[in-house]
Image: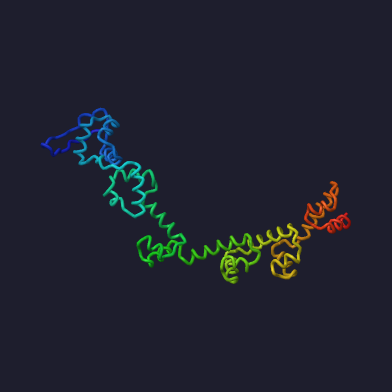
Amino acid sequence: MYINSFSYPVKNLKISFTSRKLDNGFISKIQLEEELKNGSSIEEISQKYNISSQRISVLLRVFGLTTPNKRHCLSETELNLRMPKLIEQGATISKMSESIPRYQIEKWLKINLPQGLREYRKQQKTLLYASSLSNEEIAKISGVTVRSIRSKRAKYGYSSAKLKEEKNLELIKNAMNHSLKIKQIAQEVNMAAGTCSKYIKKYGLLEIFYQKLGQQIIQRIQEGTNKRQLAKELNISQNALKTLMKKCEIEDAFETHKKAVIAKVHILSREGFKVRQIAEKLGISSRAIFYYLKKFN
C-alpha cells in the first residue's frame, strides 16, 4: 500500500511514503484502528505487519490515533467479574468505558455476547415479560412505571391475564395425568369445576382427557377392579360408567381383560400349576379359577 503526503504538525515536516513501500509490509488506517481497538501495542503491530515501530509511531501521529493505556487494563478474571455486573445494571458501553478500556469492553462482548449487547438485552427483556412475575415486580426491577410494563407485556403478547391462563392450562394438563374426574382436577388446581371444564373444551383437551381417563380405567381393571368398585371410585352409577367408557372408546375393556385372564389361567394350568398357585399368581380367587377352567374349557 502507498500513502500520499501528509502534513505533519511537529516542526512542519512533510512525510511522504508515495515513492516507496512501508518497510517490507503494508497497513491501512482501518487495519491500524482495528489493531488498536483490540489492544495491540506498537511492538505487536510492528511484528504482525513487518513494519518498524518507528514507522508505526509516525503513522499513529499522522492519522491522529493513540495507543491504549496498558497500565489501566484489567486482568481477565477481573474483567469477567465486572462486565456481567455492569451489563446487569444496564450500563451503556460509554458508561463502562469510564472504568474499563473500551477495546477490552468490545473484545469481551465479542467473545461472550456474539449476538451483540443490544440483542442480548432484548432477549432478557422478553424473558422478563414472559416470566410469572407481576407487573409491579417487573417495574421495580426495570426502574419504569407499572403502566409501561403493562403496555409492553401486552404488546409482546405476555399480558398478565394471558400468562395466568397459560399457567392454569399447564396445571390442568398435569392434573389430568392422575385424576379421574373434572371435579378432582378442579380441586387439585384450586379452580371451580365449571371453569376447569371451560378450559378443557376451549383448548381442545376433551379428547386428551378421555384418552388419559381411558388409560387410567384400563389400569384399574388390570389391577382387578370390577365394575361396581370402579363406579364407586368415580362416584357414578354403573350405567354412567358404561357411558363414560364408551366416550373413552374402551367399552369392551372389562371383557377384553377377562378373556386375557382366562387365557392365562388355562396356560398356567397346562404348565402344571395348581388352582391355589394360579389364584396367588393372578391375584384372583380359587373359586374364579375353578369356574374359568370348567366354563371355558
The location of residue 250, given as percent across then percent down, is 72, 61
Res 53 → quadrant: top left
Compared to residue 164, the image places residue 284 above or below, namely above
Residue in the image at 85% along x and 59% along y: 287
Please state if 14 lies on the left or on the right of 128 as rendered. left
State the quadrant of the N terminus: top left
Quadrant position of residue 286: bottom right
Q: Which of 64 and 111 is in front in this view?
A: 111
Residue at the spot x=28%, y=37% of the render?
40
The C terminus - image quarter: bottom right
- Image spot of residue 69 (x, y percent): 24, 41
Q: In this view, does 108 lie above or below 294?
A: above
Q: Name the residue: 75% across, 69% down.
A: 238
Q: Where is residue 55 in the image (x, y as percent from the top left)?
A: 21, 32
Q: Is residue 62 left or right of residue 223?
A: left
**Image quadrant assignment for residue 33:** top left
104 vs 177: above or below: above
Side of 136 relative to 53 (left or right) = right
Q: In this view, does 185 lie above or below 87?
A: below
Position in image of residue 133 (x %, y %): 44, 62
Q: Looking at the image, which is closer to me, 171 or 253? A: 171
